[in-house]
Amino acid sequence: MHRPQKKKSSKTKITKSAKKEEVTNNDKDKNNENDNNNPIITGHESKLYLSLHMGMTGRISSPHHVPSLESLSEDDTYPPPHTHLILRSSNGEEAAFSDPRRFGSVLVDVGVDDDDHGDGEDQNQALMVDEEVSIPTFRDIAQDALESSKAYCAAMKLSKAKTPHSDSDTNTRQQHQQLTIVEQLSNRKKGIKGLLLDQRAVISGIGNWVADEILYRSRIHPDQSYLTLTESQKLVEEMHQVLFTAVAGLNYGIGFPEEWLFHRRWRNG
């Protein structure tokens, strides 16, 4: 009995070598894309920006001072354990970046040449712009929490004072910009603590315990979403109070207020 022959598939058979070549080409394309986004540093650049992300346990030490960390045993040896980078200057000074838990990072970015700004008045105008804008590492980071909350509180104080110049176009425009932080924190689907911790959403510079302290003082649940304007205003006011007090305390060696949640939070480690 004659059996009918099976028809050959019209699909082209891809060999292993062809697949391998295709994958290799894709990898090359991706590498070329990355090279375009991350230019190679030659050492001849007029400007380079070094950015150090501290993570949770990052610290910068010198031979004369090694900052202590509560999460580590008392060890003031230099360079500290888990040192990942040592910077040395031409005059012999040096500093070390260490990070035991390795949540931090070290980034080097190529700066913008002064020639790119043009000449004369155009160059002076360009140089007036905050240099952070030209650093790729910082381009996506939101406004600073301390500066933004400070500006908001100052604008509210000015508004309540009702000074003769408060109705001018300049002051109105500045107040509108400063009040934006409250509007951006209001009526958001994302939980408020997650929003505070997201360094690219609305504000940057707030970590875990600071977020808890702000929310505790504001009487707002960490998972609450869709804040009202009134709740956001209270949140920003407490944000400024907590950040201002914390920074001042660290600068002058003053302990945090006894009523803060911070002390209860760390009591049991």
Image (cartoon, rainbow, N blue to C red):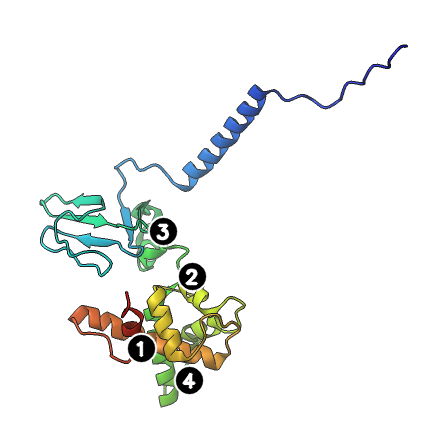
Q: Earlier in the sequence, mark 1 or mark 3?
A: 3
Q: Which residue is mark 4?
A: 167
Distance (Cα) linking label 3 and label 4: 38 Å
Q: Please, what is the three-letter code of the amino acid marked with disc 2?
A: Asp
Q: Which mark is residue 241?
A: 1
Q: Which residue is mark 2?
A: 198
Q: Please, what is the three-letter code of the amino acid marked with disc 4?
A: Asp
Crowd around label 2: few <14 · some 14–19 · many ≥20 (10 Å): some
Q: Earlier in the sequence, mark 3 or mark 4?
A: 3
Q: Earlier in the sequence, mark 1 or mark 4?
A: 4
Q: Which residue is mark 3?
A: 137
Compared with residue 124, is residue 4 higher up or lower down, i.e. above or below?
above
Distance (Cα) linking label 1 and label 2: 20 Å
Distance (Cα) linking label 1 and label 4: 27 Å
Q: Residue 115: horizontal and vertical position, in percent?
A: 31, 46
**Residue at left offset 49%, top offset 31%:** 27
Q: Please, what is the three-letter code of the amino acid marked with disc 1?
A: Gln
Q: Is residue 64 visible?
A: yes
Q: Residue 191: horizontal and vertical position, in percent?
A: 49, 68
Distance (Cα) linking label 1 and label 3: 28 Å
Distance (Cα) linking label 2 and label 4: 35 Å
Q: Quadrant of residue 41?
A: top left
Nearer mark to the viewer, of 1 and 4: 1
Q: Please, what secondary structure does the residue beneath circle 4 have?
A: loop
Distance (Cα) linking label 2 and label 3: 15 Å
The N terminus lies in quadrant: top right
Q: Residue 21: horizontal and vertical position, in percent?
A: 54, 23
Q: Which mark is residue 90?
A: none
